[in-house]
Image (tube, grey):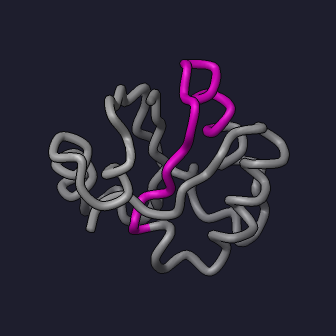
Amino acid sequence: MKIGILRCDEHSNRCAGYGCFPAIQNKTGKFEEYDAIELVGFDSCGGCGRGKADKIVERGQRLKDKGAEVIHLGNCLAGVCPFKDVYAEALTEKVGIPVVMGTHP
């Protein structure tokens, strides 16, 4: 499965994917269901849109254009972002790609 990961821009200043990348490699957390994983991109949401999804949709479209078949919202975004559901819905509707909430355990 070709995946893309979008993470919280604010948290990206403190985390370089320390939980996401081992989870991909070890097929743990939200990656358990995949037989094979190809990471096509690892990007941020683009900065807090406060419910406006234009930046994250742009980033999601770029991941899809690079071959992503699914987008995972990193735990930093899926766990604490008050707009996560708005963003997931916008990615699904406007980019036309499935969204999985979370990455690592």
Is residue 19 within the magenta segment?
no
- Image point 31% across, 52% down: which residue? 32
Is residue 69 within the magenta segment?
yes
- Image point 50% across, 56% down: which residue? 73
Q: Position of residue 100 (x, y in %)?
A: 54, 56
- Asked if residue 89 lies left or right of residue 5, the reply is right
Q: Position of residue 40 (x, y in %)?
A: 42, 26
Quarter in which the C terminus is drawn: bottom left
Compared with 38, 51 (above or below) is below
Stretch in magenta: 59-76
- Image point 70% across, 60% down: which residue? 87
Tally the marks: 0
- Image point 76% across, 59% down: which residue? 89
Question: Quick one: which residue is furthest to the top in this view?
Answer: 66
Q: Quadrant of residue 94?
A: top right
Compared with 27, 84 (above or below) is below
Quarter in which the N terminus is drawn: top left
